[in-house]
Image (tube, helix red, strand yellow):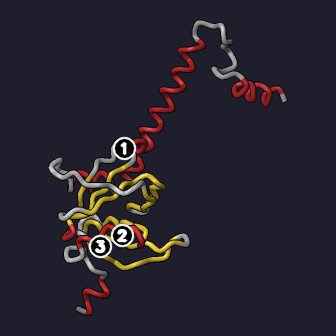
Amino acid sequence: MKIIDSLLSWFNSPAGMFLEAGSPLYYPVRGMGLLLFALAWVYAARLRAQASGWVELGSRYPLHRLIEPEFSDLQTVYVGGVKYWKAVGLAAVREGLVLRAAWLTRPFHQTFLVPWSEMEDLGTTDYNGMIYRNLLLDRAFRTRLLVEESLYSKLAGEYAAAVPRPVSQSLKA
């Protein structure tokens, strides 16, 4: 019981069980906690970017600053199987599809543009109760992007001639 009380005391005192609010080390220890949280956030962003394939896509298809796309509101997409919940802005331009991470998730997530010619449309898929457009962003890396069907049709509507068609439609044509 004494061990449990000792462990719980760490959570009762904001800077740990050995520091009182009047201690000269109180504020530096609190600051170190915030610093550790920020470092953990950046490290998690790095792991997420590498696991999803965002790092490879960003290095292979960097966005040239000559293009100023108009991004959609933050959307929920799946990149390489990793869910980005309300954390990605999408834009369709003449050259291709642009993806930009929200500012909180931006470390290690470079904004990139995948040309329409490099994408392959694998049709629609039902995932978690939603209808998504399944896109293969890069044939070499085989990174998939799932975008809500309604958003994809809105973004790709302007560039219908350049947008890849689903594989089943390509085989019929």
Which residue is the site of mark 1?
106
What residue do we see at 38% from left, 60% from top? 79
Q: CA distance from mark 1 to mark 2?
A: 22 Å
Query: What is the spatial separation of the Cα atoms under label 1 and label 3, in whole angstroms?
Result: 28 Å
Residue at label 2?
A: 152
Distance from label 3 to label 2 (Cα)?
8 Å
Question: Alpha-carbon neighbours of circle 3 within 10 Å: few (<14), some, or many (≥20)?
Answer: few
Q: Is residue 49 left or right of residue 2?
A: left
Residue extending furthest toward the bottom: 172
Q: Which badge, 3 or 2, comes first in the chain's sequence?
A: 2
Q: Is residue 59 above or below residue 138?
A: above
Name the quadrant containing residue 171: bottom left
> Looking at the image, which residue is at 27% across and 63% down?
92
User: For the residue marked with disc 1, what is the amino acid?
Assistant: Arg
Tell me the quarter of the picture where residue 160 sits. Answer: bottom left
Q: Dot 3 corresponds to which residue?
A: 157
Q: Nearer the viewer, residue 48 or 155?
A: 155
Amino acid type at image mark 3: Gly
Q: Are marks 1 and 3 in contact (CB under 8 Å)?
A: no
Percent coordinates x, y for residue 162 in the rendering: 20, 73
Quarter of the image containing the N terminus?
top right
Tell me what residue is drawn at x 25 percent, y 70 percent.
158
Mark 1 crowdedness (10 Å alpha carbons): few <14, some 14-19, many ≥20: some
| Quarter occupied by residue 70 | bottom left
